[in-house]
Amino acid sequence: MERTNKKGFTLSELMAVVVIIAIIAGIALGSYRSITEKAVFNEGLTIAHTIAAAADEYYYEYHVQPASLEKLVLDLKGVTVNGKNISSKHFTGVFAPTSSVRLSSKDYPYDLSVSMEYYGQRPDYCIGKDSQGKGKAFCQ
């Protein structure tokens, strides 16, 4: 009898490798999405906090609430302000001079509201609605 040396993989071996790779990719994709959502949410918090802090500083200096965002000194790259409207890559929102900054995500189901405390206080309360629509206090 002649013995032949066959080189290569069987179909079942290849299928097992494909299944393992698919499982690993599924886990990695879920983690990536979660990390991306958190990054976008933190971007929104940064925008809202910066605007609220600038409004607070304006009030502290002039003893009157700012009427629009143009009166505030903002150093936010990638954020466009027009009157009381806020727009960035991931968020749109409204500045309410008497109370808060409200942002809604364009990509994820997040609504942020950062309340402002005037009289020299920093913004100290913010609520974000998560993907289930439940409000969470993120910065008390």
Image (cartoon, rainbow, N blue to C red):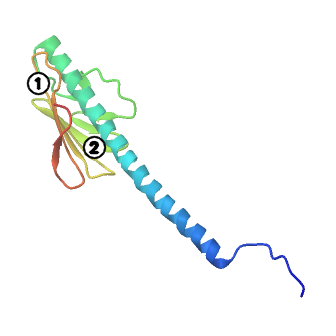
Is disc 1 surrounded by few (<14), some (14 to 19) or many (20+) residues within 10 Å? some
The residue identified by callout 2 is 92
Secondary structure under tag 2 reads: strand
Quadrant in the picture for residue 38: top left
* Front one among 125 and 1: 1
Is 122 on the left or on the right of 22, as rendered?
Answer: left
Is disc 2 surrounded by few (<14), some (14 to 19) or many (20+) residues within 10 Å? some
Is 67 on the left or on the right of 38, as rendered?
Answer: left
- Residue sitting at the far right: 2
Q: Position of residue 59 (x, y in %)?
A: 14, 17
Of the two numbered discs 2 and 1 on the same chain, state the one appearing first in sequence. 2
Residue type at the position of mark 1: Glu
Q: Position of residue 49 (x, y in %)?
A: 24, 29
**As drawn, 132 above or below 55:** below
Quadrant in the picture for residue 98: top left
Quarter that holds the C terminus: top left
Is 116 on the left or on the right of 93, as rendered?
Answer: left
* Front one among 41 and 60: 41
Residue type at the position of mark 2: Thr
Secondary structure under tag 1 reads: loop
Q: Are marks 2 and 1 in contact (CB under 8 Å)?
A: no
Residue at 22% x, 23% y: name it. 53
**As drawn, 100 above or below 105:** above
The residue identified by callout 1 is 117
Q: Position of residue 68 (x, y in %)?
A: 19, 28
**As drawn, 59 above or below 40:** above
